[in-house]
Image (cartoon, rainbow, N blue to C red):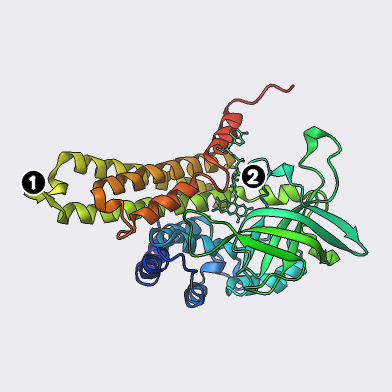
Amino acid sequence: MTDERRMIQQAARDFAMNEVLPLANKLDPEQGDIPMSLRDKLAEMGYFGIVIPEAYGGLGLGAFEYVLITEELARAWMSVASIIARGNGLGGGFTAEQRQEYLPRMARGEFLGAAALSEAEAGSDLANVSCKATRDGDGWMLNGSKMWCTFADGADFISVLARTKPPSDPHRRHEGISQFLVLKERDKFPPGLTGSPIRKIGYFGWKTWELHFDNFKLPADALLGREREGRGEGKGFYGAVSGLEVARVHTAARAIGLARGGLEDSLAYAQTRVQFGQPIGEFQAIRFKLAEMATEIEAARQLTYFVATEIDGRRRCDKEASMAKLFASEMSERVTSQAIQIHGGYGYTKDFPLERYWRDARLTKIFEGTSEIQLRIISDRLLPRVKK
Ligand SMILES: Cc1cc2nc3c(=O)[nH]c(=O)nc-3n(C[C@H](O)[C@H](O)[C@H](O)COP(=O)(O)OP(=O)(O)OC[C@H]3O[C@@H](n4cnc5c(N)ncnc54)[C@H](O)[C@@H]3O)c2cc1C
């Protein structure tokens, strides 16, 4: 850890604890949205452009700094640690012209995205998408439904995965899928796009939507990946799954931040809660739980730092990124659950933020590739499958 990184971490910690945590404690219980004033402050800190090159107005930092800041923000509110990923170069399929136009706005928090990849029948099996884009003059027409699109309402654009050709062979279903850039006005759905919010159990601060495209017209330049060989029409699946290492360490850092919340609150509680005439932190049962929680968090953090270093060094680390995501998210649910245990009955109330940490930690095992999918990736790298 360099001095510069420590300063970045400390600045993010101060910001998270002073600006984010009080809002999370107030808004999460009432399922309120992240306020625009906080989004503006995140933009001022440069957090929407951490990994965007300085030439485009970003901070020009790497995956390591991205995870440092993410952990701090997630310590306060996971949704805020998540919204920064809606800038930070989301939309790898931009042309040079689009990069010039959009990346500076993204770095300033003025052009934030939502990702409409998943569908009701296409989650882990993303190649099963059935939302269709057909040719319409020079442009395209989108028809079909998407599921789980977080921030579809507040975003300035939605990146949509749609089938442009039926698969030629059932073993090559990932071909014939394309990615499209749907530009939209903030807080509105354009004509031809409707949505309904999904009633989720956590991850409040923003809404997650089921979307329906009905003869939704798109211009020709909405097709993403056009300038990259092997990424244009029919190759959108590869674009959607590229950069997953960064997404996975980002999720690992979110999980670590949540677990840290559980540990820090438990350490404080263990010193003030008195039973049998002494603080519960004097009981070895509680002390050992705290020791195990801290150890698990540190193990996840060091693995995440390692993967971030590999990403920044441009070395292949898909297996390790899956390990970090798997270990950190499973750890986070265990640790936040232990934090509830240390708080006894009070841990099971809405008067303490522990239930938020736990609800949000639970999600980290599901999105950005479920734990089972991470295990599949890791085991496939350890033990290649026999070709059938
Ligand atoms: C709150 C929330 C927000 C989300 N936000 C977004 C978003 O913004 N954009 C977006 O595109 N998506 C988003 N998602 C979708 C998320 O990525 C998917 O839920 C996830 O990929 C799992 O897909 P699924 O829900 O269809 O589960 P399924 O794929 O149906 O999985 C069901 C179960 O089967 C297991 N399983 C599936 N396949 C295998 C296999 N091959 N081997 C072993 N086990 C397997 C899974 O691990 C899981 O336990 C969000 C989801 C949630 C809950």
Quadrant into which the N terminus falls:
bottom left
Task: Please give the name of the residue rendered at 71% of the width and 51% of the height, measured from the top-left corner.
Answer: 239
Q: Ligand 1: does it lie within 8 Å of the C-beta at label 2?
A: yes
* Amino acid type shown at disc 1: Phe
Viewer can see residue 191? yes
Task: Please give the name of the residue rendered at 36% of the width and 53% of the height, measured from the top-left corner.
Answer: 355
As measured in the structure, the alpha-carbon distance from the residue carrying label 1 to the one carrying label 2 is 50 Å
Which residue corresponds to mark 2? Answer: 123
Helix, strand or loop at mark 2:
loop
Relative image position of residue 245 (x, y in whole percent)? 58, 48
* Amino acid type shown at disc 2: Gly
Q: Residues within 10 Å of mark 1 (few under 14, many from 20)?
A: few
Relative image position of residue 28 (x, y in whole percent)? 42, 64
Q: Residues within 10 Å of mark 2 (few under 14, many from 20)?
A: some
Helix, strand or loop at mark 1:
loop
- Residue 107: image quadrant is bottom right
The label number, if any, that marks residue 229 in the structure image = none
Relative image position of residue 115 (x, y in whole percent)? 65, 58
Ligand 1, seen in the image, is in the quarter at top right
**In the figure, 286 relative to 69: above or below?**
above
Q: Nearer the viewer, residue 140 or 88?
A: 140
Which residue corresponds to mark 1? Answer: 276
- Residue 388: image quadrant is top right
